[in-house]
Amino acid sequence: MEIKYKRNASLKEFTTVRIGGTSDYLFEPDSLESLNEGIKIFKEKNIPFFIIGGGSNVLISDNGYKGAVIKLSGDYFNKLVVKDGYLTCGAAVKLSRVVDFALENSIGGFEFLYGIPGTLGGAVAGNAGTAENGICEIVHSVNCVDFYGNTEKIIEKDIKYQYRECASFFNRIILDVNFSIINADKERNIKNIEAIRQKRESNPKGFSLGSIFKNPPGLKVWEIIDKMGLRGLRIGDCEVSNIHPNWIINKGNATGNDFFQCISLIREKAKKEFGVNLELEIKILGNFKGK
């Protein structure tokens, strides 16, 4: 089977922060068969690869990525199906679409995901959610494939997750996710979403990756950054948000290096002044100066 890919593809447009160079290859499979074939070829040629979803939690180097970026596409990975008491969603479906679909069909339990960017696959792999809830808590089962073409269904009790992390999907690619349907009153769902919408209205505006660091046990990152006097810090066209210091905003023409310098400065000062090792909530792709 022949696969199609793009060479030297710009990655900036695939991220919510609008930062990043090019990848040697951009591969957009639209079926399990093409995905497996692409991975097989990349492995045979010793080409590293990275799976990107909505690009809402990855900082890409200005020098790009020396390998293949894989972005799931097509109907196979974008399905939304209700059958036998389950809602099955393809990994490439945007979270916003899942929330809208659940609302339209009076399905409860998805309201807390309102306003979170990215795709479903990426959300489950990173256990996206709020401070109180993570998406893995409501998952029934996940169909995935490893890097050797072996498919597997991982059921609820076997999914190992913690805050903003799901170890069950390391070295696996999520294909689709199944949720048990909880029937709910549509008007109540609308009220729940409206309450969340109002809360999220206070989030910083602009190109960003959302929260950069995980909260250490018993601490809040934004308070640490604030106490260090870094609220409003600006490096190049990157700014530590004045509204929420755990967000870094691309004010228009920021580079990956600008962003990475902000991250590094915050981590260094947190270690020096508070003895805290701040763990990233986002992923870093490519090479950065000082990494």
Image (cartoon, rainbow, N blue to C red):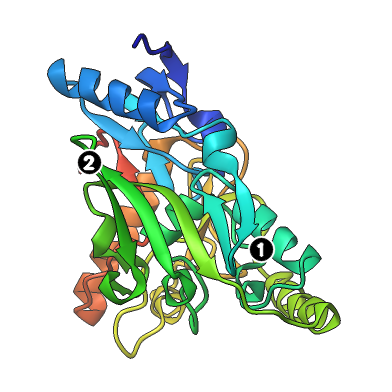
Residue 240 x/y as whole percent: 51, 59
Which residue is at a point 44% across and 81% down the rendered structure image? Answer: 223
Helix, strand or loop at mark 1: loop
Above or below for 81 versus 191: above
Q: What whole-number distance in Å separates the C-alpha atoms at marks 2 and 1?
A: 34 Å
Q: Residue at x 39, y 32 (%)?
A: 32
Residue nearest the viewer, comparing 107 with 219: 107
In this image, 158 relative to 249: left or right? left
Does 278 sit left or right of 14 as displayed? left
Question: Can you say which quadrant of the picture contains the N terminus?
Answer: top left
Q: Which mark is residue 267?
A: none
**Residue type at tag 2:** Asn
- Image point (21%, 47%), residue name: 171
Task: Examine the image and state in which quarter residue 191 appears.
Answer: bottom right
Sequence order check, earlier mark of 2 and 1: 1
Residue type at numbered disc 1: Gly
Q: Is residue 3 above or below residue 249?
A: above
Task: Specify whether residue 14 is in view.
Answer: yes
| Image marks 2 and 1: residues in contact by CB distance under 8 Å | no
Q: Which mark is residue 115?
A: 1
Question: Dot 1: few (<14), some (14–19), or many (≥20) neighbours within 10 Å?
Answer: some
Task: Tell me if residue 282 can be seen.
Answer: no
Q: Which residue is mark 2?
A: 150
173 to the left or right of 46: right
Judge depth for marks 2 and 1 and give the one in front. 2
Q: Position of residue 139 (x, y in %)?
A: 45, 70
On the image, the x and y values in percent for residue 210 come to: 52, 59
Image side of residue 64 versus residue 237, left or right: left
Location of the C terminus by quadrant is top left
Q: Name the outermost residue toward the front.
A: 84
Secondary structure found at label 2: loop
